[in-house]
Image: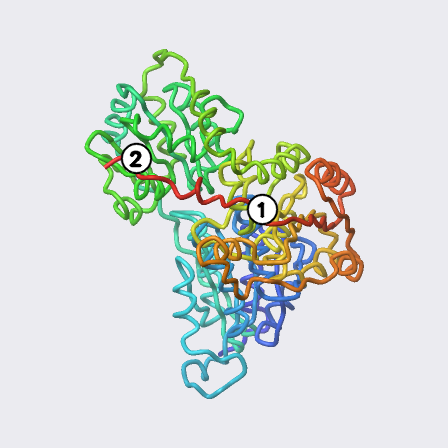
Amino acid sequence: MTSTPSAPTAAQTLVAGLVSNGVNHFFTLPGVQNDHFHDALHGALDKIRVIHTRHEQGAAYMALGSAMATGQPAPFCVVPGPGVLNAGAALCTGWAVGAPMLCITGNLPSPAIGKNWGILHEIADQTGLLSGLTKWSARITSPATAAALTEEAFVQLRTGRPRPVALEAPLDVWPARGEPAPLPPSAAPPPLDDAAITRAADWLSNAVCPAIIVGGGAQHCAVEIQALAERLQAPVISYRLGRGILDSRHPLALDAYEGHLLWPQVDVVIVIGSRAQVAMQVWGSDANLRVIHVEIDPEEMARIRTPDLAIEADAARVLPALLAAIPRFTRPAADFSALRAQSQTENAHLAPQRAWLSAIRAALPDNGIAVFDITQLGHASRVLWPVYQPRTFLDSGFQGTLGWAFPTALGAQVARPDAPVIAITGDGGFGFTLNELATAAQFRIPLVTIVMNDNAYGNVQRTQVEDFGNRTLCTDLQNPDFAKLADAFGVAYARARTPAELGGTVRAALAKRAPAIIEVPVGPMPSPWKTLRFKRMRG
């Protein structure tokens, strides 16, 4: 490549694009194919806080947590080959939850790509691999293309359905110099379908029992959704990614179990930024249910059930127009107290989980962020954990990624220094990434991590006991002494044995604003699947 001494390198151009797009923190694990990129990143340390981890999965999960907690693009960098593969679990989780993550990686020298020469970190078709984990990926082939591709990456992150994207650059391209090509003009979004919005307003206004289902694609529309719910006196039903869009204390907020109990009565439902997979596929639908679907991703419209009315657009554009089209009539105030009482009765078997969760929730401020792993409390939290603000309940969605909570919560805490963050994990899941205690200590990330320790992969072991005649296999765990582990990493440690003790311990740990582990010795807990394996209610 022709070198122009005064021109920026491809790496410098990409870093300049990060800065111009508002990036102020960055997660990485360096390596030889990305040396020139990290040198360029060093030149922006006055603008970007760079945090390096002890494993590539840690860097990717931290970017995931940052993206989920803020809704803003979150970049990370790993080496090609094994580094990309190590980041894969976080990327596929980001795909499941709609997280705007930017994976930056290197590649072999340009002449070696695709030749199978056995060069360091070579894997077959890394570009194809990344395309299967992201909504968009590209290779920077020259310094001239670096600016346009970086800008396109951020366009992809901020338009359409948020999902991970990836940029890769061969080792010889990073240091190559050249003037960036002009950026293409940005495209305007298509106009709204006014007729569809008018029709939706008519259906909702005349419904006997309207309902609203929200998902992760509606997290940025909390104000409008509350206004719509109150105007219609319609409940807002949320599960996993939609939790907190309407404050759980609001009289119109229903969790998934309460929504499930109401479902047979609903005659018009508006689904906003959600697949509504549980409702459409499990609870069921019939000819007496009209479904309005507001969704920015056209592929989701008919994935499970073709809606009666599809509105393809960002909910943030649709909802103001829908509110303007719905008359300001007065409906009788809806009362769902009987549903809540029925849910309490039918889920009384989850009293142990409820006690632990209630103690933690009482200790966490309203704006506190909780990241739940796939653990005894994590499953139950989907219906038992009250959520008061958007983006404060982080769940791995349909991917169900064991071991994700601790490093993801680290990233959420970096991105939201104004909010306390806790990770709730088990001893099994914590073991996946406990090495990142070093990252928490080195960068003084004040995350409080609660480790529910039953010395087992508890959920699997309970299934083996209950469904397979007590034939347990591969579920008993030999754990470290967590007190000594915390001390070795320079992290605070405490133990709590009762819910009341845990609540006070969490408060004390949060007040110190320093990384901490709280170990909670527990035994087997009741199965949540009586609650979460919903029955078919219609059709």
- Residue, x 29% and y 49% (percent of image)? 299
Q: Position of residue 303 (x, y in %)?
A: 28, 48
Residue matched to label 2: 537
Q: Position of residue 259 (x, y in %)?
A: 39, 31
Instruction: Please determine whether, in this image, residue 330 is positioned above or below residue 222.
Output: above
Q: Name the outermost residue toward the front.
A: 469
Q: Position of residue 335 (x, y in %)?
A: 42, 17
Secondary element at tag 1? strand
Residue matched to label 1: 371
Of the numbered discs 2 and 1, the one sitting upstream in the chain is 1
Q: Position of residue 90 (x, y in %)?
A: 51, 59
Left or right of 333: which side holds 106? Answer: right
Instruction: Please determine whether, in this image, residue 384 is positioned above or below residue 376.
Output: above
On residue 303, which mark appears?
Answer: none
- Residue, x 39% and y 57% (percent of image)? 135
Left or right of 197: which side holds 314? Answer: right
Where residue 338 sits, quadrant-wise, is top left
Measure how far apart labels 2 and 1 are at the Cα level.
Answer: 31 Å
Q: Name the outermost residue toward the bottom.
A: 117
The three-letter code of the residue at mark 2 reads: Met
- Residue, x 69% and y 50% (percent of image)? 521
Instruction: Please determine whether, in this image, residue 492 is positioned above or below residue 271.
Output: below
